[in-house]
């Protein structure tokens, strides 16, 4: 007997006042990425709401401390399979008032020589007014700080980021180290995924770069 009862989509709402986690780690080993390890010392989510029927998530704040990520790149990198949304589906909408990262570290090395190519410590990031739905993303980078292994210290970085399927924009970017100061605006009439396919990139740059910041790369 055929079931003729029409099913209605779920219209659940979930509200979370606060979630806290501590000492979470993750490790992965693949052919294209021989090693990926990541974890956090402590983290919290405050003021979360999810509406299944509307396919939306709203978060007041996410704070992470003591995060780490170590990567070992393979000799041959896969181009990957493009991610596509199922036909007729609507991408989830995600909004966050503030995303904050403190006292974190990142390292990346190649598989051949085993020499570490990039090491960053003391990473701190704050992003406000985050919006994401599918390929559309916006956010206000309030601050970014980090110390590179050769001693270069990124003391401050700010920018407004605007991404969608028709444009990629970085406005009001400001980067400061102990020896350099850079002001930058960049725009391209394409998505981030297509940015490297010979699409013109319009850049306005005002920089004062100290030789001490260039020496480690020479």
Image (tube, rainbow, N blue to C red):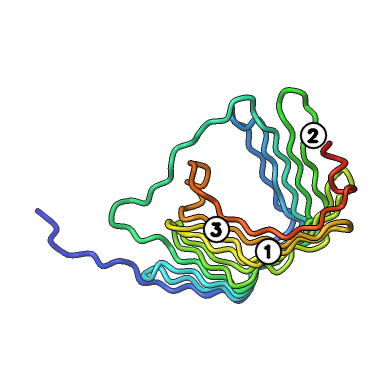
Res. 58 in view? yes
Closest to the observer, 148 or 108 = 148
Q: How many marks?
A: 3
Residue of label 1: 173
50 above or below 120?
Answer: below
Residue 23 left/right relative to 81: right
Query: Which residue is found at the position 82% from the left and 39% from the top?
Result: 217
Query: Which residue is found at the position 76% from the left and 42% from the top?
Result: 107
Res. 99 in view? no
Q: Position of residue 48 (x, y in %)?
A: 56, 73
Cα–Cα gap, marks 1 and 3: 12 Å
Sequence-wise first label, 3 or 2: 2
Residue of label 2: 116
Query: Which residue is found at the position 80% from the left and 60% from the top?
Result: 181
Closest to the observer, 71 or 166 = 166
| Farthest-out residue, left | 1
Q: Are marks 1 and 3 in contact (CB under 8 Å)?
A: no
Q: Which mark is residue 187?
A: 3
Query: Which residue is found at the position 73% from the left and 59% from the top?
Result: 22
Q: Are marks 3 and 2 in contact (CB under 8 Å)?
A: no
Q: Position of residue 92 (x, y in %)?
A: 43, 63
Q: Position of residue 111 (x, y in %)?
A: 71, 26
Label 3: which secondary element: strand
């Amino acid at each position: 007997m055929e079931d003729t009862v029409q099913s209605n989509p779920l219209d659940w709402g979930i509200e979370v006042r606060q979630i806290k986690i501590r000492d979470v780690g993750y490790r992965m080993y693949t052919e294209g990425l021989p090693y990926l390890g990541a974890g956090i010392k402590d983290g919290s989510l405050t003021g979360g709401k999810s509406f299944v029927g509307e396919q939306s998530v709203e978060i007041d704040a996410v704070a992470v401390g003591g995060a780490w990520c170590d990567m070992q790149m393979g000799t041959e990198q896969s181009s990957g399979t493009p991610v596509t949304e199922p036909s007729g589906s609507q991408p989830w909408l995600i909004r966050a008032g503030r995303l904050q990262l403190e006292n974190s570290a990142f390292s990346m090395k190649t598989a051949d020589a085993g020499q570490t190519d990039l090491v960053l410590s003391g990473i701190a990031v704050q992003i406000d007014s985050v919006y994401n739905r599918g390929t559309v993303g916006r956010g206000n980078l309030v601050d970014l700080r980090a110390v590179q292994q050769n001693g270069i210290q990124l003391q401050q970085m700010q920018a407004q980021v605007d991404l969608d399927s028709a444009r990629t924009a970085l406005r009001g970017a400001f980067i400061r180290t102990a020896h350099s100061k850079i002001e930058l605006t960049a725009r391209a009439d394409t998505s981030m995924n297509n940015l490297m396919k010979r699409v013109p990139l319009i850049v306005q740059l005002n920089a004062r770069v100290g030789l001490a910041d260039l020496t480690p790369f020479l």
